[in-house]
Image (cartoon, rainbow, N blue to C red):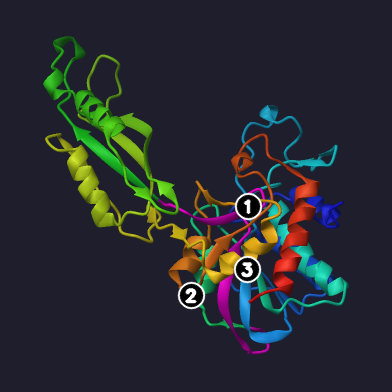
């Protein structure tokens, strides 16, 4: 049985939409204090920070989680009420069970369990549950902008590695692609639909582009895999069914490791000869953030994998973005490892198995005791 069950259920019953994480942040800090963390506090951004000193002090591992979650959507589509934290046959149901209150609770209780047994990790551990992860990572961005990491008593710790606790079914994750959103505006000339002037109708420009996109071979990264360029939304400026549009806009969701210039070259090829305008934003805007990746033979990965291999022999990658992109950009070696099925995140079927939570606690504890 997962020892942090009651605490997790309390978190699940507390809505913590992005921008409203204050109460849950305070509750997380309270639990860390009760479990004997050496430091536990809310920083100036509202991030919940906990520190457990290790046998060797000065260098620290950062455990990454967050406090916010997405909206539950139509509650009628849920088998169980999304905020009731229903436990059924050792399966806990509800919004946030995998993204990310289940993983957060497992991280907290892994450290708390060590302290209750009179043990300490091999080196310092900083557990950070960040705000506003779901909308781009404001919490971790502000946290890293204040580096070096300084304890409340003024001591400085050097962050030498990071483990992102997003759900991975307890598999070691080597990273994920970056995410960008690009809007293409196809140009035409509005006219009465009865004239059938196809050369002035931007819908046909759009259709030509989509045909090219479907046939285009996107790059494949050796670690995080195939890039994707996916149409998600279409809108036009016509308000009538019998009038064509002057413009048709298409939103593309782009998951890749490409630089903005490489993305522009791809779009230049795909839009050659078409009447269209677009803008590829530079990195680290809300429209374009990079991913991260780490080599499988990196010491941090190997150190973690030796304790995980009895569960998962191979490595994985996430399809979605995480706060790991920020630590990677700050030259902090970053790897992923968290309980819960990542395919359940943001869905009305979100749930987590207690056995998987306890499995994560036990593996994480062994890893922390053996930190290199």
Q: Position of residue 207 (x, y in %)?
A: 25, 25
User: Compared with residue 10, is residue 76 higher up or lower down, i.e. above or below?
Assistant: above
Residue 13 visible, this angle: no
Find residue 303 and name its label. Answer: 3
Q: Quadrant of residue 243?
A: top left
Residue at the image position 70 percent from the left and 51 percent from the top: 311
Name the residue that disc number 1 marks: 313
Left or right: where 311 falls relative to 176: right
Give me the residue at 56% from left, 77% from top: 160
Q: Position of residue 135 (x, y in %)?
A: 51, 53
Q: Which mark is residue 186?
A: none
Asked whether residue 26 is drawn in magenta, I would say no
Task: Choose the circle earlier in sequence order: 1 or 2.
Answer: 2
Q: From what the image shows, is residue 62 above or below residue 257?
A: below
Residue stretch rendered in magenta on the structure: 151-178
Total numbered circles: 3
Extreme-top residue of the structure: 194
SS of the residue under disc 3:
helix
Quadrant hosting residue 230: top left
Identify the disc placed on residue 145. 2
Q: Residue at x 37, y 58 (%)?
A: 285
Locate the C terminus by quadrant. Answer: bottom right
User: Which secondary structure, mark 1?
Assistant: loop
Q: What x and y, as percent, mark residue 94?
A: 73, 41
Separation of disc 3 and disc 1 at Cα? Answer: 13 Å
- Dot 2: element: helix
Rate crowding at label 3 as few (under 14), some (14 to 19) or many (20 or more) other CA atoms within 10 Å. Answer: some
Among the two numbered marks 2 and 3 on one chain, the one whose residue lies closer to the N terminus: 2
Alpha carbons under labels 2 and 3: distance apart = 28 Å
Q: As rendered, which of 352 and 284 lies closer to the eye?
A: 352
């Amino acid at each position: 049985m997962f020892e942090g069950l009651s605490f997790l259920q309390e978190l699940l019953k507390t809505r913590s939409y992005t921008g409203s994480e204050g109460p849950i942040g305070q509750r997380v800090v309270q639990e860390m204090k009760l479990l004997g963390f050496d430091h536990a506090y809310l920083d100036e951004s509202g991030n919940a920070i906990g520190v457990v000193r290790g046998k060797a002090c000065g260098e620290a591992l950062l455990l990454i989680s967050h406090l916010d979650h997405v909206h539950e959507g139509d509650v009628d589509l849920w088998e169980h009420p999304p905020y009731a934290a229903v436990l059924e046959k050792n399966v806990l149901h509800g919004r946030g069970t995998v993204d990310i209150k289940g993983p957060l609770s497992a991280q907290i209780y892994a450290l708390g369990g060590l302290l209750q047994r009179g043990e300490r990790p091999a080196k310092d551990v900083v557990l950070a549950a960040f705000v506003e992860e779901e909308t781009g990572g404001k919490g971790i961005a502000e946290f890293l902008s204040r580096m070096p990491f300084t304890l409340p008593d003024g001591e400085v710790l050097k962050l030498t590695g990071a483990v992102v606790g997003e759900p991975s079914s307890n598999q070691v994750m080597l990273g994920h692609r970056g995410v960008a959103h690009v809007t293409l505006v196809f140009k035409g000339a509005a006219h009465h639909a009865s004239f059938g002037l196809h050369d002035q109708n931007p819908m046909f420009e759009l259709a030509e582009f989509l045909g090219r996109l479907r046939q285009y071979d996107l790059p494949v990264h050796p670690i995080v895999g195939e890039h994707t360029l996916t149409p998600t939304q279409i809108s036009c400026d016509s308000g009538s069914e019998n009038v064509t549009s002057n413009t048709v806009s298409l939103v593309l969701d782009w998951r890749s490791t490409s630089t903005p210039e490489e993305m522009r070259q791809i779009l230049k090829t795909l839009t050659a000869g078409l009447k269209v305008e677009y803008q590829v934003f530079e990195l680290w805007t809300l429209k374009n953030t990079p991913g991260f990746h780490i080599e499988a033979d990196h010491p941090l990965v190997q150190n973690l994998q030796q304790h995980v291999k009895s569960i998962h022999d191979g490595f994985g990658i996430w399809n979605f973005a995480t706060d790991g992109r920020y630590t990677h950009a700050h030259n902090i070696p970053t790897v992923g490892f968290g309980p819960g099925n990542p395919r359940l995140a943001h869905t009305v079927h979100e749930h987590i198995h207690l056995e998987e939570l306890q499995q994560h606690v036990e593996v994480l504890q062994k890893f922390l005791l053996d930190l290199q």
